[in-house]
Amino acid sequence: MSGAAPSDAAAATGPAPAAGAGRPPAPGPGGLSAAIVRRQTVPIRVGSVVIGGAAPISVQTMTKTPTEDVDGTVEQIARAADAGADVIRVTCDTREAGEKLREIVRRSRLPVIADIHYDAPLALMAIDAGVHCLRLNPGNIRQPEKVREIAARCQAQGIPIRVGVNAGSLPDRGKLERGRGGGGPEEVAARMVAAARGHIAILEALDFRDIKVSLKASDVLTNLAANRGFAALGNRYPLHLGLTEAGPSSTGAIKSAMGIGILLAEGIGDTIRVSLVDEPEEEVRVGRQILANLQTRPSGPNLVACPTCGRLEINMVPMVARVEAALQRVRRPITVSVMGCVVNGPGEGMHADLGIAGGRQKGILYARGRVIATMPEDRLVDTLVRELERIAAEDQRLLAAGEALPEGIPEAALAALAAATDAS
Ligand code: SF4
């Protein structure tokens, strides 16, 4: 095996297509909309989470605490888990971080990916710590014997490796113009794909194929071109999607929705990470919204809220903020509508699992297509938020117990809501 830098000529063939390849896969539970035919990939396993194949698209995020701070990191992982993350990535840059990984893995509610750059001893420490996946580029490790050792240890312990190429860290990025290269997104994307193929070829030469791949840029067009280019190679390695340095939530969420959502709609992508200048749980929330809008993840809540106009009859903006906050911890598929007047409010309310429609200083509470009560404006939103908090608590309890989540509002809960509304 050669430890030389990856070359453009290196081949990444990937696992051979299985019999029946080319047939559209049946959408799995929580998987893509039936209208989207997913690129066929060979699944890998990151702890308890399957990535690729017919598995639902999983949502990842990354801790932002120093990994040396075990309590802070574990607490952040717990918040990401509450928000609906499936997998967590933790950076590992120092010996002390490598030593702390074992405790983090033991206390983490999510499978842990260790993010390693250049440092083979840290990769071996992470494997010893029991991490569930490594994010590591073998072409960046100079000693071939160390790459061989890492691959052998991962193989023996069933630990996959994510090969990740970022446009901003291409070897000759100094020649790029504004991060895109003189030829524009297509040229940078082609070089990203070549770099990924080089890293993959090093692992394939060691007969290691438990691989997933990411190609990330900070602009949407390069991101699209790189991932389309890799998908067109015809191998079956799962793809991790995301934009790097997407920015603060207000703009980064839009860029990510485009850069990730367009690819998912084309059937490309098996797991996603939204990168924001924000808390990990916000990244998860945006990621889940992207999936929910493609019906890849109908397990999430969906908030319908009118934009308001001159007909507005209630104080909508703070109401929507309260409802949105209450929905953060809800995990089941549920549609909630918050509408400002009687023009569109009743229609949306009747179609939602839970909804409110404003009137003059009062409004109507709907649940599962029924009018539950008419009540004053201040009580209206209190009642809705209380019900969402009850649902969130039930969801968290069911998930902790490993039980399936119900869809929407079961009949018994509806009756309880109606009774509580009568009594109040
Ligand atoms: S629901 Fe009523 S208040 Fe809201 S945008 Fe429509 S017409 Fe305007």
Image: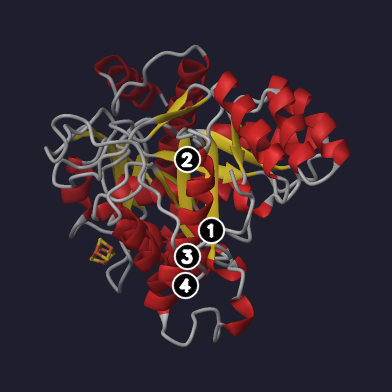
The amino acid type, in three-letter code, at marker 3 is Met
Q: Secondary structure at mark 3?
A: helix
Q: Which residue occupies the extreme right position in the image? A: 96
Q: Is mark 3 within 8 Å of ligand 1?
A: no
**Front label number (2 vs 1):** 2
**Front label number (2 vs 4):** 2
Q: Is mark 1 within 8 Å of ligand 1?
A: no
Give x and y (percent) for residue 78. 64, 31
Depth order, front residue of 296/340 = 296
Quarter of the image for the C terminus: give it: top left
Could you tell me which residue is drawn at 82 percent across and 38 percent down?
97
- Which label is found at residue 219? 4
The amino acid type, in three-letter code, at marker 4 is Asp
Q: Secondary structure at mark 4?
A: loop
Q: Position of 148 compared to 217: left or right? A: right
Q: Are marks 1 and 3 in contact (CB under 8 Å)?
A: yes
Q: Which residue occupies the extreme front position in the image? A: 1
Ranked by sequence position, the earlier of labels 4 and 3 is 3
- Which label is found at residue 204? 2
Report crowding for label 2: few under 14, some 14 to 19, many 20 or more residues within 10 A (C-alpha): many
Give the residue number, with chain letter if any, for mark 1.
Answer: 165
Ranked by sequence position, the earlier of labels 4 and 1 is 1
Give x and y (percent) for residue 110. 58, 28
Ranked by sequence position, the earlier of labels 2 and 1 is 1
Q: Are marks 2 and 4 in contact (CB under 8 Å)?
A: no
Q: CA distance from mark 4 to mark 3?
A: 14 Å
Report crowding for label 3: few under 14, some 14 to 19, many 20 or more residues within 10 A (C-alpha): many
Q: Is residue 58 visible?
A: yes
Give the residue number, with chain letter if any, for mark 3.
Answer: 192
Q: Position of 135 compared to 395: left or right? A: right
Question: Vertical placement of 128 versus 302: above or below?
Answer: above
Q: Position of 66 compared to 110: left or right? A: right
